[in-house]
Image (cartoon, grey):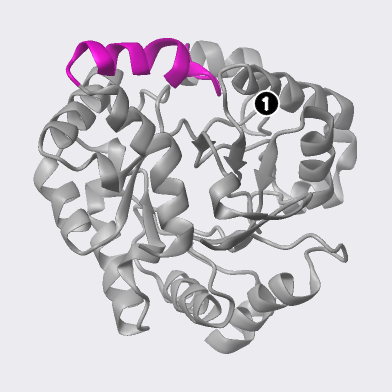
């Protein structure tokens, strides 16, 4: 067992229940919101988040991990407000989301200075609250392991050693950089079972995904509904094949859904990005298809109930 911090308090890992491992209550630009707050409607964003969270609660979801950190507009007070309204356990994160550069405040300092800030979130609370993060987040995309991205990954690794928090990444499978992330974590001495390489479902390259799994990490099949990188059919076929080979104990199912985003208006998301994307999509459409393709109910349970518990416990 392990203690996991939600935005409304600490729970035991046995209390996670049915878990969506990668969803966003809100995503927005830190700097744009600070400079031009009139562009945002707090009440509308809150309403959209509550609607989605209450919808998945009706499907039995008890816990949502929200990897919104610096670079994505993290606001733990907003997360707490949604959690208290809905009764769903929301787990927030610390870390940094950048594909290339860190803010100049961190460019001017070393890795340990950045790690210290992540540890401070855990020891003292995020954004002058008592709310503690339940996991660490970093990202690598098509730009690759830039110096600032490497600094972030190493800082996350060092913060992990000081806090015991599990690690989730954003990765870019087309570049194979989930493996590069794992190399850096290995250099920093992180146990792979504490690492979830996110967005592995953006490829149907089974061999690549197996190389990540064979390193001992978990893989996120966590973007159901997004169709720009790969079709829904290919996402499904990949999970079916991995489950057939006995790897349901290393996979997570989720959607990377953003209840609101300042990149797209909700109506634009439906037209441009993902017509069926929602926080309930896997329950309403994907899981029934997976079951019809031979994935067992036990394997679905493993991906939604057991793997989150094992990941936070590092096993």
Please check the rendered image and state whether residue 168 is part of the magenta-colored stretch, yes or no.
no
Nearer the observer, 178 or 90: 90
How many marks overall?
1
Res 253 seen here: no
Q: Residue at x 40, y 70 (%)?
A: 146
Q: Residue at x 28, y 12 (%)?
A: 289
Q: Quadrant of residue 227?
A: top left
Residue 136 as seen in the image, left or right of residue 203: right
Q: Where's residue 169, x and y in %? A: 43, 56
Q: Residues within 10 Å of mark 1 (few under 14, many from 20)?
A: many
Residue 174 as seen in the image, left or right of residue 196: left
Image quarter in which the C terminus is found: bottom left
Q: Is residue 26 above or below residue 153?
A: above
Chief SS of the magenta region = helix
The residue to which callout 1 is attached is: 53
Res 287 seen here: yes
Q: Is residue 113 above or below residue 62?
A: below
Q: Is residue 170 above or below residue 283?
A: below
What's drawn in magenta, residue-wise?
276-294
Q: Where's residue 56, x and y in %? A: 60, 22
Nearer the observer, 193 or 116: 193
Please check the rendered image and state whether residue 293 is part of the magenta-colored stretch, yes or no.
yes
Residue 106 as seen in the image, left or right of residue 277: right
Q: Residue at x 84, y 64 (%)?
A: 130
């Amino acid at each position: 067992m392990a203690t996991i911090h939600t935005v409304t308090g600490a729970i035991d890992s046995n209390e996670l229940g049915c878990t969506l491992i990668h969803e966003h209550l809100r995503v927005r630009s830190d700097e744009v919101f600070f400079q031009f707050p009139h562009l945002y409607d707090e009440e509308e964003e809150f309403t959209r988040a509550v609607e989605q969270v209450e919808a998945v609660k009706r499907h039995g979801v008890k816990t949502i991990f929200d990897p919104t950190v610096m670079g994505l507009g993290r606001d733990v007070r907003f997360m707490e407000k949604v959690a208290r309204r809905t009764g769903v356990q929301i787990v927030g994160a610390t870390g940094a989301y950048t594909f290339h550069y860190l803010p100049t405040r961190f460019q001017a300092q070393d890795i340990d200075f950045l790690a210290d800030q992540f540890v401070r979130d855990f020891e003292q609370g995020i954004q002058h609250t008592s709310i503690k993060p339940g996991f660490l987040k970093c990202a690598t995309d098509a730009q690759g392991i830039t110096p600032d991205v490497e600094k972030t990954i190493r800082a996350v690794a060092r913060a992990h050693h000081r806090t015991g928090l599990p690690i989730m990444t954003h990765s870019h499978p087309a570049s194979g950089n989930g493996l590069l992330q794992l190399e850096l974590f290995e250099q920093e001495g992180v146990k792979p079972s504490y690492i979830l390489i996110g967005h592995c479902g953006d490829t149907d390259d089974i061999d690549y995904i197996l190389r990540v799994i064979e390193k001992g990490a978990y893989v996120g099949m966590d973007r159901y509904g997004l169709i720009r990188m790969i079709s829904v059919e290919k996402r499904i076929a990949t999970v079916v094949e991995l489950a057939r080979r006995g790897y349901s104990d290393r996979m997570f199912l989720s959607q990377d859904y953003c209840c609101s985003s300042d990149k797209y208006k909700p109506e634009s998301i439906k037209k441009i990005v993902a017509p069926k994307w929602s926080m309930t999509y896997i329950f309403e459409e994907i899981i029934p298809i997976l079951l019809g393709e031979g994935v067992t109910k036990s394997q679905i349970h493993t991906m939604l109930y057991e793997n989150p518990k094992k990941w936070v416990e590092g096993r």
